[in-house]
Image: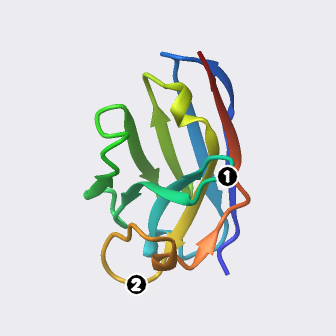
Amino acid sequence: QVPLVESGGGLVQAGGSLRLSCSASGRTFSGYRMGWFRQAPGKERDFVAAISRSGGNTYYADSVKGRFTISRDNAKMTVYLQMNSLKPEDTAVYYCAARVANGLGIGQNDYNYWGQGTQVTVSS
């Protein structure tokens, strides 16, 4: 098990920024690929971004490319999602997830452990 706890969500105006954090516990955090997903009301949970174990490789959904940045600090056992130029359609509960297998995953089933989520609301 990898307990994951997200934080940093909130209410922001369109065009604003937020930085989400996902803190993990346990000694093996650096061994996991990490990802961010989001789920808007009445919709499926969608992939947002993923990062490799070292942080050297990242991958983004087209909808957030150029606006969001995923990063990690293995010493702090934390993964971040910097969100800039936020839009009302970015409103969702954001989840971080940890992946055991090789490669960056983009599907929910690619990840083994999940956080509880943090709400992000972007007002127009």
Task: Measuring from the top left, give residue 81's x and y in whole percent.
Answer: 49, 42
Asked if residue 112 can be seen in this view, the reply is: yes
Q: Is residue 62 above or below residue 24?
A: above
Instruction: Please name whichever residue, 99 or 29, is drawn nearer the observer in this view of the structure.
Output: 99
Q: Secondary structure at mark 2?
A: loop
Which numbered disc covers residue 42?
1
Residue at image location 44% in from the left, 76% down from the top: 31
- In the rendered image, the residue lying farthest to the right is 116
Asked if residue 75 can be seen in this view, the reply is: no
Answer with the quarter of the image where residue 3 lies.
bottom right
Task: Measuring from the top left, give residue 12's x and y in whole percent.
Answer: 63, 20
Task: Measuring from the top left, give residue 122's x and y in whole percent.
Answer: 61, 25
The answer to whether marks 2 and 1 mark residues whose Cβ atoms lie closer than 8 Å is no
Amino acid type, residue under disc 1 in the picture: Gly
Q: Secondary structure at mark 1?
A: loop
Residue at image location 50% in from the left, 55% down from the top: 36
User: Badge 1, how many Cα within 10 Å: few under 14, some, many 20+?
Assistant: few
Looking at the image, tell me whether mark 2 or mark 1 is earlier in sequence order.
1
Image check: 85 left or right of 11? left
Amino acid type, residue under disc 2 in the picture: Ala
Quadrant placement of the C terminus: top right
Image check: 14 left or right of 103? right
- Mark 2 or 1: the one toward you: 1
CA–CA distance between discs 2 and 1?
30 Å
Q: Is residue 91 above or below residue 55?
A: above
Instruction: Please name whichever residue, 26 or 98, is drawn nearer the observer in this view of the structure.
Output: 98
Q: Which residue is mark 2?
A: 101
- In the rendered image, the residue lying farthest to the left is 57
